[in-house]
Amino acid sequence: MSTHTAQACAPELTREVLATLEGAKDARFKHIMSELVTRLHDFVRAVDLKPEEWIQAIEFLTATGKTCDPKRQEFILLSDTLGVSMLVVALAQSRASATGATPATEATVQGPYYWEGAPERALGDDLGEGVPGEPAFYSGRVLDTEGKPLAGALLDIWSGDGEGVYDMQMEGNDQMLARGRIRTDAEGRYWFWSIRPSYYPIPMDGPVGRMIDRLGRDPNRPGHIHMIVSAPGHVPVTTHLFVSDSPYLDTDVVFGVRPALIVPFEKKPAGTAEDGRTMATPYWTARYDFRLAPQRD
């Protein structure tokens, strides 16, 4: 090995780069960048990274950025499929939550299809109007970790349609579909209609899809519906409800499944539903109680 190569591989190079961070005024930023440089250099040495491989990595990240647009966030998809999103979510929930008699509802990934500003809807409204899928009635309560109902808690809800397609993926569509925000009643109860969610593959036509294919991983997510549940003085939770008999619960490509979030969907015959609505076709019901932890002082 030449002297130049030996110097490039030596820890002295890492120390030289770290020394340039000493002038950083933000202590947290300095800490994060120091850890990033240290581990990145360790990684390069550990795998003996070749120049052409590093160029391929740069081209991959460049392509990931170019794939992003207002309705598609390929970097979030990359983070999700590497398990980073789920790790960050778990750390955040642990950091923010106080203890209680019952654990708070587990958080999971937000995913790339959240669309801020969903319309306010009344309790009992049908969020699934205009999209294909089997109707489903959702109900439950929002409680704190001591079991106290939280009146006026907000549920920001979204899902794909019955074929696993989100409104943001529909060519030429600029309307919010299968989305809405509802608030619990005085007893912390919520109920609404939507569709029974279907499993679906993540987008495979971009750089992340090509990575998943090259790794030989299954690209599918199990059927789920998203919620961000919040209430004043409590830690908000971004979570899913997963269909209990959906395929891919054990192989979720974004590592988002938690056993406590798997919910039975019961099929009901046509007739009068729980909220008094007359259903001309069979429908599904799903019930789940969310629990929010009080915020730490």
Image (cartoon, helix red, strand yellow):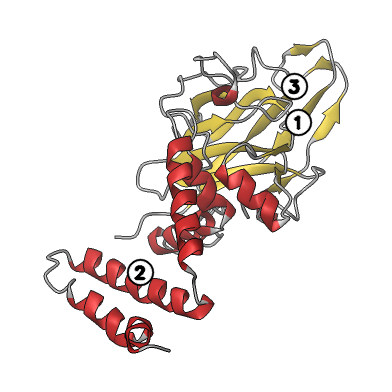
Residue 284: where, in percent of width, then height? 79, 28
**Residue 285, which numbered label?**
1
The quarter of the image holding the C terminus is bottom left
Q: Secondary structure at mark 3?
A: loop
Determine which of the numbered discs, if any, sits on residue 36 in the image: 2
The one of 181 and 17 positioned closer to us in this rendering: 17
Question: The N terminus appears in which quarter of the rendering?
Answer: bottom left
Q: CA–CA distance between discs 3 and 1? A: 14 Å
Residue 57 image position (x, y, % from top left): 48, 57
Residue 89: tell me if it is visible.
no
Q: Residue at x 69, y 50 (%)?
A: 213
Which labelled disc corresponds to residue 133? 3
- The kind of secondary structure element at disc 2 is helix
Q: Residue at the spot x=67%, y=30% of the render?
A: 138
90 versus 163 height, above or below = below
Helix, strand or loop status at disc 1: strand
Disc 3 to disc 2, C-alpha distance: 45 Å
Q: Are marks 3 and 1 in contact (CB under 8 Å)?
A: no
Please state the horizontal and vertical placement of residue 250, each as a whole percent of the image. 76, 55
Q: Nearer the viewer, mark 1 or mark 2?
A: 2
Q: Is residue 204 left or right of residue 73?
A: right
Type of the residue with mark 3: Gly
Amino acid on which the number 1 mark rests in the picture: Thr
Front-most of 31 and 115? 31
**Three-letter code, disc 2:** Leu
